[in-house]
Image (cartoon, helix red, strand yellow):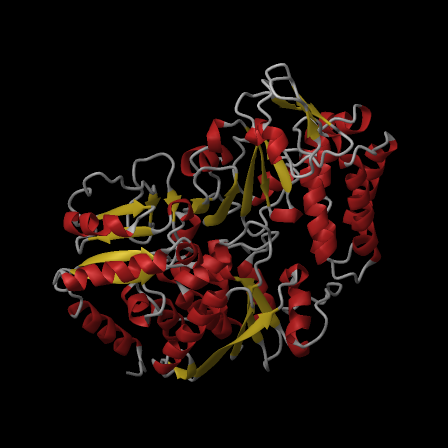
Amino acid sequence: MIIKTPSDLTAKVAELKAGFSGKTQLLVSLGTCGIAAGGSPIAAALRKHVTEQGLESKFEVVDVGCLGLCYCEPMIEVKAANGKSLIYGNVTEEQIPAIVAAGADKVAEGLQVQATNIYYPEDQEKPEKKVVQTRIALRNSGRINPEKIEDYLLKDGYQALAKVLTKMKPEEVCQQLVDAGLRGRGGAGFPTGKKWQFAAAQPKGQKYIICNADEGDPGAFMDRAVLEGDPHAVLEAMAIGGFAVGADTGLIYIRAEYPLAIARLKKAIEQATSYGLLGKNIFSTGFNFTIELKYGAGAFVCGEETALIHSIEGKRGEPTFKPPFPAVRGLWGKPTIVNNVETLANIPAIFRKGAAWFKSIGTPGSPGSKVFALAGKINHVGLVEVPMGIKLRDVIFELGGGITDGREFKVVQIGGPSGGCITAKNLDTAIDYESLKALGSMMGSGGMIVMDEDTCMVNVARFFLDFTVDESCGKCTPCRIGNKRLFEILDKICAGKGTPEMLDQLEELSNVIKDTSLCGLGQTSPNPVLSTLKNFPDEYKAHIFEHRCPAAVCTAMLNYIINDKCIGCGLCARKCPVNCISGTQKTRHHIDQSKCIKCGVCMRTCKFAAIDRK
């Protein structure tokens, strides 16, 4: 069926609703994380059980994207037609009969359900719970089959596009985004509506809409989850953007390391085109819009919009000085809008519900919600989408479940290698663009890496600089050479070869790199160094003046010592990979520090706590 008018879309949705069986759905999370955790065999076993037991009239097995509960994959959600649902985590094939037998009315005997604290502001009133997720960008992820456009249509899919094309003028579309206050979710938070207005103001002619799906921050996987779980939301938003600025071509720049997202995007584009929702004369308005995929090779710098554009053009992925901005002169020299995946995923909801609705969520300066990828030493690793203005403490300890193994919280790194660390004293900071910037960090794309008391902050700064050095395009000297020098200094400090002068050198060089680098990569790369210097000066001093790593992480300054608890069992000596432990039976053994490679096998092996790490 080709949908030619909004009435056709309404009729199609009515047809789909009429054919909705009312069965209880068994939703199996099959994003990348779910598949990696063994979700595919669970889905196959679930289908087999339903068929063998003759339960096809009561249950429907649905493959969905990631719900964000990555810490408990494989996962099954049992969802009744009345909306009641139960979520089971860490599911095994042996548990399937009990889960199906219990349905959505009661918890399967012997199993526990997962609490989500999620609400969907388009569908529900806000619950009374103080700390909840607020799903806008992730509205459909984990709730629909991303490979069936019909599921998206049943969730008000393409209604926003129909409204925009048939009831609004391009300038009204841009203004509604301005009024909503949507800020870019992939970096410094530039207002999306203003960016669209700049491109719309350019003379008529060829223009482009680019979706930046080149997600490269360590520990970040928000955009991947959206593309795998709700690809049509991005396609619909790009078409809306094309109408607003006068573009008829969209491109999705996605790294080749996302094969599942690529496959689902391809299918979504084919389906939308077959329905007439992409292509020529959409909704019989004369508006044409097509979308194609462009693959990146995984260069971090290509997340910067001008480097991304050069990569699409077949050139080296190097940034260029701005202005002119891409909205004025971008791909092939034509006006170009570049928005990241999460930014685009918010747009259909804004046009369905209105600017005032969106602005009622979050804070006046940072409206809406933000998706974060929780990683590191946190119990509930995965995705959360929270209203702007929520406290860091609530994200980490309420939604994130706190620190693993009962350890103490030390810092959270927000914004990936471009961000900075936030300590326990600032846990009550509200999450918004300005507050994070004031702490020497940044929102970035939304990676949130949590670290515990056993983390060495000098080594953390070294890790992020190592990443930046590898990912620098090398075009400008401050980034190419300056970051290399920063890394070398940190490497010496971690190796116990630091000098007092290096403290001043780190700060001075960091500020020079920030002030003189060409693009955002170099301008923000020293942030981890400056924030750790500011918040943990004593750790730097211990490394330099005492040749000691307080967290016992930097192996060059680390010694394993056998203490008086040793009973001479010889187990550590037998397990040592370099044979550096000597001693006779039932006597205290000794470690030859000149041969020790600091692997820690001896300490992990010892059953009597007879080995200390100093």
Q: Measuring from the top left, give residue 241's x and y in whole percent.
A: 49, 69
Q: Is residue 460 above or below residue 191?
A: above
Give the residue displayed 66% in from the left and 33% down from the top.
Answer: 553
Give the residue displayed 58% in from the left and 17% down from the top.
Answer: 567
Residue 566 visible to an observer of this rendering: yes
| Nearer to me, 495 or 329 | 495
Q: Measuring from the top left, give residue 401's x and y in whole percent.
A: 42, 35
Residue at the outermost front position = 585
Q: Is residue 138 above or below residue 15?
A: above
| Nearer to me, 605 or 234 | 605
Give the quarter of the figure containing the N terminus: bottom left
Q: Is residue 532 above or below residue 350?
A: above
| Nearer to me, 120 or 498 | 498
Q: Measuring from the top left, give residue 573's x and y in whole percent.
A: 63, 30
Give the residue displayed 35% in from the left and 60% down from the top.
Answer: 40
Q: Is residue 7 above or below residue 574?
A: below
| Nearer to me, 356 or 147 | 147
Q: Is residue 62 left or right of residue 544?
A: left
Residue 600 position by quadrant: top right
Give the quarter of the figure containing the C terminus: top right
